Image (spheres, coloured by chain):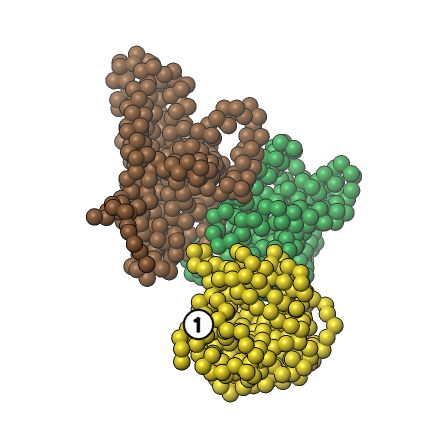
Amino acid sequence: MIWIDTIVQGILLGGLYALFAAGLSLVFGIMRLVNLAHGDLIVFAAYLILVGVQLLGLSPWVAVLIAMPLMFGFGWLLQTVVLNRVLGKDILPPLLVTFGLSVTLQNGLLEGFSADSQRIPAGTLEGASLDLGLVTVGVMPLLTFLSAVAAILTLNALFYHTALGRSFRATSDDAVAAGLMGIEPKRIFAIATGIAMVVVTLAALYLGMRANFDPSIGPARLIYAFEAVIIGGLGSLWGTLAGGIIVGVAQTVGAAVNPEWQILAGHIAFLAVMLLKPRGLFPRAVD
Amino acid sequence: MLLETHGLTASYGQFRALFGVDIAVAAGECVAVIGANGAGKSTLMRSITGVIRNQAGMVLHRGEPIGALTSADIMKRGIAMVPEGRRLFPSLTVEENLLIGGQARKAQGPWNLDTVYDLFPILRERRKNPGTALSGGQQQMVAIGRGLMSNPELLLCDEISLGLAPVVIRDIYAALPKIRASGAAIVLVEQDIGKALSVADRVYCMMEGRVTLTAKAAAVSRQEIHAAYFGEAA
Amino acid sequence: MYRLTTRTRAGTATAVAMLVLVVAGVMLPAFASRSVIQDLFFILTMLTLAQLWNLLAGYGGLVSVGQQAFVGIGAYAMFAGVILLGWDPVWAIPLGGLAALLLAVPTAFFAFRLQGAYFAIGTWVIAEVTRLLVAQWKALGGGTGTSLPREATRNIIGTDAIQALFGVRDAAARDILAYWLALVLVVLATAGIYWLLRSRLGLALAAVRDNVDAAQSVGVDAAKLKWAVFLIAAAATGLTGALIFMQTARISPDAAFAVTDWTAYVIFIVVIGGIGTIEGPILGVLVFYMLRSVLADYGSWYLMTLGVLAIVIMLFAPTGLWGLISARSGLHLFPVRRRLTGAKIEGGT
């Protein structure tokens, strides 16, 4: 019985990792950019929500709605002012710039908010749980998982059933030809990063409500997100969810065996998938 | 003039591909640009559409310089390109490939999904297929249709017969008069001289990055073209 | 009549200047205070790490964010040699290089499966895994770490002679020894990379960097080349890590596998100085040290400044400070480019 419980908790945790990963996957899919600051941007968004809650006295659910357009704007600016300038055949400049951004964000947050642990208050939801007969699940983890599914459904609908999504896919296929169709690739990239930041904000809400966070935890979130994307196979958001679930289950099972092995078990699962299926479980894109 | 270039010069790195090219296209006209492989025809198309930056000279659209604009802005002015190698978007279906051609520029005109499907009926059957799952000839039809979807004033067609079987080329060329009849001017970049002359009003011949012949298609002699194409007397 | 050469007048001058600098560096402990020696130790070890990362990323195109794995495993292997095998710390340093080399094999095996930019995060994951595994090593203190035993640090080979020679105490003698070893390491690393780039391997690297397909078509095995560069850099990084922690004599998984200290700083040094040149990291480490001295009291502002500086340099001067200097003056202190010399070529087509 305890094992079923452990696995269910792991699956729900996977939802959080899929939320971390969706933005990373989106940006990579469209512009082949790996943003090393992705984890720190999640933490940054969590602080933004926290400011809304603590300073303005908003409910976290309202604060996240305000933070989303702000983060969209931030992502749009980041892409327009910085990242569009370094995108190109050479992968070195964007990697180094986003690495610099990662360190800058971490230390900026450290300066602004100190190294103390913070938490976004979730009110009555915090300890609430739901008895599903076989297992009891926390309302918060369940909500996280459902949000991840909803985010993926929304992103897929955007991708496959709107003119913007068409532009995303076309630009990803061939940016020069997209330009000949009247699509400005740099504008598309800016919108894509903006949307990724909206997903990041949603991920930040659950990151901050479920556990304590501080400015230093970004890189670990980047790694979980990255593992979920690679396990799932590049280019498939459902694959990313599956990848997140595999990392999540490996972590909860590892922790059940020995609490010190939680993180390690997630990484080992990732390496095992890499060994058996180098292109991930559901490969689609050919890069 | 709908489109003019004056002294257009362009390079790929150290390699200079265009040396002061002057061409002009009037509204509604069909102009052929012929020349051997490497004569600079495709480079000329890429310079006009902003894919590569020209180093010297000007490109004018209705008298206004467009040389500094991006590809996207040039397209929105009504200059659509059917690029060399077709370059359909593999992630998009046939219909999506067509739709994306008309997405950025909203202009009045005869072309929409229905009329493009009437022009190339086979595409209607295949509209749910991925664009790149089609035969070469059908892909070329999608590429032309995609160019038409924005109802352009000028359609630049880069090597639309390249690598296709004669029967297929005939089908594609059969569409060109209908496109002209809808009012669009056409620039036809071709290596197949006979095909190009069969539909064009005027012809430019290029060799080694320069225009070597400008003539009316009806009046030009084989010898003249031969000399301009190969750089020697026939 | 024509010869391909990499020799330039500036290159020869550099060789002479370097020789003078190294001799002066060896004699320095006779005059300098202990804190100067410690600072120089820091500069020299950071420079070694920077040169090695530059070899990987700047010349090999392998942007690793996981070099802390090799610093850490090298340091831990050295500690294991001392604590578990009872070796002298100096003799245990090569053990660090060996351990890093051994770790580099599976690391490369996994990370090379990841294309392009994902390689970077892949190396980071391996470094995390190594850190977490080492934290389980109870004999070396587990998660909290351990110190070198007193009897081991007191009797390090050569320290008696140094104490007698300079009339300094035990701890200062250990610093001087570590400093000398760092000097040896930085000279070996820089000279080794310089030699490597001027060898056939360097030519092959340049070919792969310019165009992988073309290089492969003329018989350069790009995959083998990547392996070679990765393993060499890993082993040397492991040696450096072992030396760094011999000097501090205290280790913990968080310190030994710190991404900030052993990778972020190193990347910033290379980027600020100029990636893809040997001069760049040298200039970069000096700027880095100066910034550190000036901003040491401002904590996180220091790292923020470095981060912003790296971004600005990548945006506006991607060849770094040395690139700016070199472009203005045409100076190449470590010429690796092959030039044709001989009589003037006449005519031409």
| Residue located beneath label 1 in the image | B37
Q: Is residue A35 above or below residue B191?
A: above
Q: Residue furthest top?
A: C167
Image point (62%, 46%), residue name: A81
How dense is the environment of label 1, judged by Cα within 10 Å: few (below 14), some, or many (20 and up)? Answer: few
Task: Say which quadrant the C terminus of chain C sits in.
Answer: bottom left
Q: Chain of mark 1?
A: B
Answer with left or right where residue B1 lies relative to residue C106: right
Judged from the image, the secondary structure of the residue bearing numbered disc 1 is: loop
Task: Indicate the colour of chain C.
Answer: brown
Task: Where is residue C242? Give x, y as percent.
Answer: 35, 33
Location of residue B7 in the rendering, given as x and y in whole percent from the top left corner: 54, 61
Q: Colour of chain A?
A: green
Q: Quadrant of residue B63?
A: bottom right
Quarter residue C219 falls in = bottom left
| Percent position of residue A49, x then y | 71, 43
Residue A287, given in percent of the width and then of the height, sits at: 48, 61
Image point (57%, 41%), residue name: A101
Residue at 36% x, 37% y is: C332
Name the amino acid type tagged 1: Asn
Q: Give the residue furthest to the bottom.
A: B167
Residue C192 relative to residue B150: left or right: left
Answer whether residue A142 is visible to the viewer in this image. no
Residue sitting nearer the eye, B179 or A42: B179
Q: Which chain is yellow?
A: B
| Vertical position of residue C216 compared to residue A260: above or below | below
Q: Which of A59/C191 is in front?
A: C191
